[in-house]
Image (cartoon, helix red, strand yellow):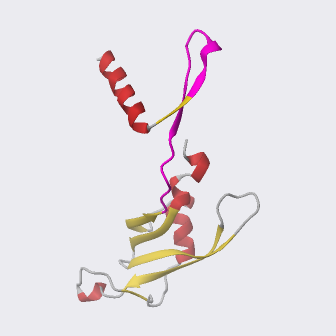
Amino acid sequence: GMERMYGIAVDQVLEIEMVLADERHVRFQPREWQDEEGFLYPKTTDVGGYCDTALDDGSLIPVWGACDDPVPPFQDLWFAVRGGSGGSFGVVTAVKYQLHEHKPLEVVYTNDTSYTSIFTKTVLFESVRDQLTELWLFFL
């Protein structure tokens, strides 16, 4: 699947916004990276973030600024929220993902009784979806 080309969804996260268990509304993202040999994506070396400073005013529009002490542990939250730890740190309200160009889907067709007729054809996802829908309706 596409995860072999780009990694799984957690590898594509650019920014996380959430309300922490202590009721603070925060937004955080990596600030520094380091290329590591043998890895597809750079290793995050520093994570920073901001707090919604307008939350106390009752405003519905966030105003992002420096967090009051104690500053949330953004480095730990980045690791934990993306699947590195159990527990309830808060509620994720938004995630910003990196998107990639659509690539054609490659499908391998084969005969169940003979492997002599194996061939590969590049098709669009919509074509595969339509074929599967027709097949499913056939069985109904």
- Image quadrant holding the N terminus, namely top right
**Is residue 107 toward the left or the right of residue 125 in the image?**
right
Point out the stretch of residues depicted in magenta. Answer: 98-120
Q: In the rendering, at what x and y percent does residue 104 appear?
A: 50, 41
| Residue 95 in the image, given as x and y percentages of width and height | 42, 65
The residue depicted at 33 percent of the width and 23 percent of the height is 134
Which quarter of the figure has residue 45?
bottom right
- Choose between 89 and 51: the one closer to the eye: 51
Which residue corresponds to the image point at 61% horizontal and 19% vertical from the top-left?
A: 118
Q: Residue furthest right?
A: 37
Above or below, comparing residue 20 to residue 39 in the picture: below
Rendered position, 111 above or below 14? above
Direction from residue 20 to residue 119 in the image, left or right = right
Quadrant of the drawing holding the C terminus: top left
User: Looking at the image, is 12 positioned above or below residue 32?
Assistant: above
In the image shown, does 55 or 100 lie closer to the viewer? 100
Magenta highlight on residue 115: yes
Where is residue 131? Give x, y as percent: 38, 26
Q: Which residue is drawn at the image coordinates 53% and 69% (left, top)?
A: 78
Is residue 118 part of the magenta span, yes or no?
yes
Residue that appears at 76% across and 62% down: 37
Q: Position of residue 55 (x, y in %)?
A: 30, 84
Confirm whether residue 5 shows in the render.
yes
